[in-house]
Image (cartoon, rainbow, N blue to C red):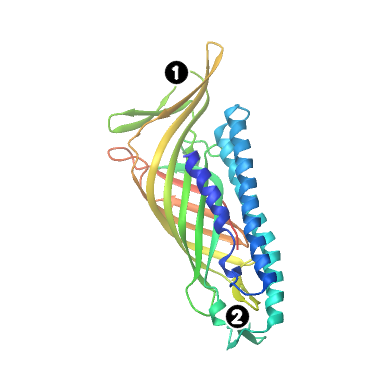
């Protein structure tokens, strides 16, 4: 899984630049040179990310950090270099826009913009961007409950059970000239972790999967489920129209937004990690198995936020374990970050 995540992180840097900032080819020598600089910037940041990830992998292999911490560090590195690309390329785009404006060759048409009635706007229809690409990162607390349980009597540690999500989302305006309603869709890798209470771990007995007390004192007991899901959200909220001589797009930076929707996907696998001390020696066990989990994942999710950050909630409608096990469902709450 960490290899899949690493390849995905490298790919993200090639797509993170907002398509609304893309430029047409031109015969101008200066513009061609600037376009080459943009390609060089992307290559430099991708190479820097690659080296940073390799260094993190070496630290994990040397057991300076565990692989869970390594995955977090690699995700942070990917976000940092993606933002580096976006910021550095924006500078080049502004220089290109200045050179293009001096040529004065574009033909503009009148637009009556609903969200900005105080000003008159002109735009080139061929440059009116409707879809943009974004990196999605979410992290927070995770748990699982049956119908007769509340969070207070859960079988899992409230603070210790956590989730992590990383993916790509495309945002498309539903209406041609209004950005109040947007459709967000894409794919994400979800890692849902559960830490049982009372020195317990999961045991598989035929069709049943149960929590049982471990014979030794556990320093750590963690059960993790890895999913590939395809979220779809309708997003609502105001935005600011941004115009340049070569493009028109909408920014939700420092704006309120609400997203409502759901997700569906597949269970990629599950594993259990145990840490304990036996005969004076520290022991780490990684147990892999089917654990009678459901293969198909689907649920509801939503977020409420300001700018790039949101409060994020997701709830699996499918039970974690198949019949005849009790219907236990995963629930998560945390923070979601997606560039605007």
SS of the residue under disc 2: loop
Residue 194 appears in the figure: yes
Residue 254 appears in the figure: no
> What percent of the width, then of the height, locates residue 216?
48, 18
Q: How many marks?
A: 2
Left or right of 82, for residue 297: left
Q: Quadrant of residue 237?
A: bottom right
> What percent of the width, then of the height, locates residue 193?
49, 39
Left or right of 193, for residue 93: right
Q: Nearer the viewer, residue 237 or 288?
A: 288
Seen at 62% across and 31% down, the residue is 59
Sequence-first tag of 2 and 1: 2
Q: Residue furthest top?
A: 279
Q: Which residue is mark 2?
A: 115
SS of the residue under disc 1: loop
Q: Residues within 10 Å of mark 1 (few under 14, many from 20)?
A: few
Q: Quadrant of residue 105?
A: bottom right
Q: Which residue is mark 1?
A: 215
Tag on residue 4?
Answer: none
Quarter in which the C terminus is drawn: bottom right
Q: Nearer the viewer, residue 110 or 165?
A: 110
Q: Residues within 10 Å of mark 2 (few under 14, many from 20)?
A: some
Q: Nearer the viewer, residue 303 or 103?
A: 103
> What percent of the width, then of the height, locates residue 202?
40, 30
Seen at 51% across and 65% down, the residue is 171
């Amino acid at each position: 899984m960490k290899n899949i995540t690493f390849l995905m992180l490298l790919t993200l840097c090639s797509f993170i630049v907002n398509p609304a900032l893309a430029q047409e080819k031109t015969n101008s020598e200066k513009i061609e040179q600037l376009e080459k600089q943009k390609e060089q910037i992307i290559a430099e940041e991708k190479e820097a990310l690659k080296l940073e990830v390799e260094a993190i992998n070496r630290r994990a292999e040397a057991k300076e950090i565990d692989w869970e911490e390594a995955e977090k560090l690699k995700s942070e590195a990917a976000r940092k270099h993606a933002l580096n690309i976006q910021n550095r390329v924006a500078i080049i785009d502004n220089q290109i826009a200045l050179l293009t404006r001096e040529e004065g060759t574009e033909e503009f048409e009148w637009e009556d913009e609903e969200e900005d009635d105080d000003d008159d706007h002109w735009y080139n229809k061929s440059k009116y961007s409707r879809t943009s690409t974004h990196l999605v990162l979410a992290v927070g607390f995770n748990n699982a409950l049956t119908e007769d349980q509340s969070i207070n009597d859960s079988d899992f540690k409230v603070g210790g059970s956590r989730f992590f999500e990383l993916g790509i989302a495309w945002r498309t305006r539903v209406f041609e000239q209004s950005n109040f309603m947007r459709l967000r869709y894409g794919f994400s890798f979800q890692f849902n972790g559960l830490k049982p209470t009372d020195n317990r771990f999961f045991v598989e007995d035929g069709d049943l999967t149960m929590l049982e007390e471990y014979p030794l004192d556990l320093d750590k007991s963690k059960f993790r489920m890895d999913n590939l899901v395809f979220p779809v959200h309708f997003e609502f909220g105001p935005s600011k129209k941004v115009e340049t001589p070569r493009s028109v797009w909408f920014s939700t930076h420092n704006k309120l937004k609400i997203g409502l929707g759901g997700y569906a996907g597949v269970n990629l696998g599950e594993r259990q990690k145990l840490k304990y001390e036996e005969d004076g020696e520290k022991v780490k066990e990684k147990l892999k198995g089917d654990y009678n989990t459901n293969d198909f994942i689907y649920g509801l999710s939503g977020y409420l936020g300001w700018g790039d950050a949101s409060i994020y909630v997701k709830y699996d409608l499918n039970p974690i374990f198949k019949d005849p096990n009790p219907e236990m469902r995963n629930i998560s709450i945390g923070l979601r970050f997606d560039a605007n």
